[in-house]
Amino acid sequence: MKLVLCSAAALLALGAVPASAQDQAILGPGFARAVPREDPVARRVLARADAALTRPPGAIPELHTEGTLPGKGIREVSLKAKEDQGVVIALGLAWRLTGDRRYLDQTARYLENWADIYHMSFNPIDETGFDTLILATDLTEADLDPRLRAKLDGFWRRMATGYLDAMDGKPKNSHTNWQSHRIKLATMAAFETGDATLIARARAAFRKHVGSNIQPDGSVFDFHERDALHYVTYDLDPLLMAALAARAHGEDWVGWASPSGSSLAGALAWLEPYATGEKTHIEFVHSQIAFDRERAEAGQKEYAAHPWDPGNAVNTYMLASLIRAESRGVAVKVIERTKRRPIEWMELLGR
């Protein structure tokens, strides 16, 4: 218990992420350079990366899991391909932790495989995991072959432009968590390219969505529609990723408020009592979405009525703490209370 408490506090000791170069999303070439290999988080990352050094990448032309039930369509094939997402970020982190070029070369192999084979669908639920490939690009881009750098720049430019163009229209679920994931991918890809026009469009899309999705009291549309805190964190986490990319470039998107007074900071405050245990919630009891009931009936227990697990907010408040000091205390409380750890790159960024 003492180790958990101490490590949770240490996790957040350094505060917000500093401003970075214009042509990266969040993580720079100096990331984690001072973290020793003996660090527990580093050991976990390196073990995963070592296991992947001989593992071939598995890009497929199309990913599709959104709206599917187990055993239906290309769901299982897509889930297998998505395993690359955790692998590539581990390889990129291992490169920065060690300077061992085996990790760099394997990260490059994975990134090129996906850039060559994958055709973007601009379904943000299917593609939300591409944030890991953007971060892996962050971690390796300065050391990649110029030919591959140019290919990746084109890939991320297509992603940013495609999602921004979609949001200029009226895409499916433009006021729900879908839009949050569009904004995450568009924003991170825009900052990855360093294109000021794309960044400005992403900023505008973020602000528009805060005004339509987050209510003045801090609740989000998805909570009222799905009756689930699962969809609150699924809404806020991608917006926080976008805000972290903005923070890395000197902008505060968390504190920005819409004309109605809604803000990402307000949404975090609304969720806080549930995350710290002052309030509880039974999930999905009054969901208005029939597919939630279909998934529960198909055996996906996470969509049946059950008490919400505050561990789902660990990454939410870890991300918030990397952006604003005000969230550090809540992040520590949630980590200590749930005994859950944030994603490794977030832990390392908080050092």
Image: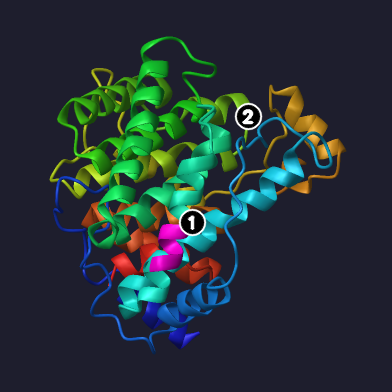
Magenta region includes residue 190:
no
Could you tell me the amino acid type at mark 1?
Tyr
Count of numbered badges drawn on the protein = 2
Range shown magenta = 105-109
Residue 119 as seen in the image, left or right of residue 265: right
The residues tagged by marks 1 and 2 sit, at their Cα atoms, a distance apart of 36 Å
Q: Is residue 153 above or below residue 158?
A: below
Q: Which residue is mark 2?
A: 226
Q: Which mark, residue 110? A: 1
Toward the bottom, the furthest residue is: 38
Mark 1 vs mark 2: which is more N-terminal?
Answer: 1
Quadrant location, the C terminus? bottom left
Image x and y of residue 111, in percent: 44, 52
Disc 2 is placed on an element classified as: helix
Residue 258 as seen in the image, left or right of residue 18: right
Closer to the camera in the image, 38 or 337: 38
Asked whether residue 332 appears in the rendered view, the answer is no
Magenta region includes residue 106:
yes
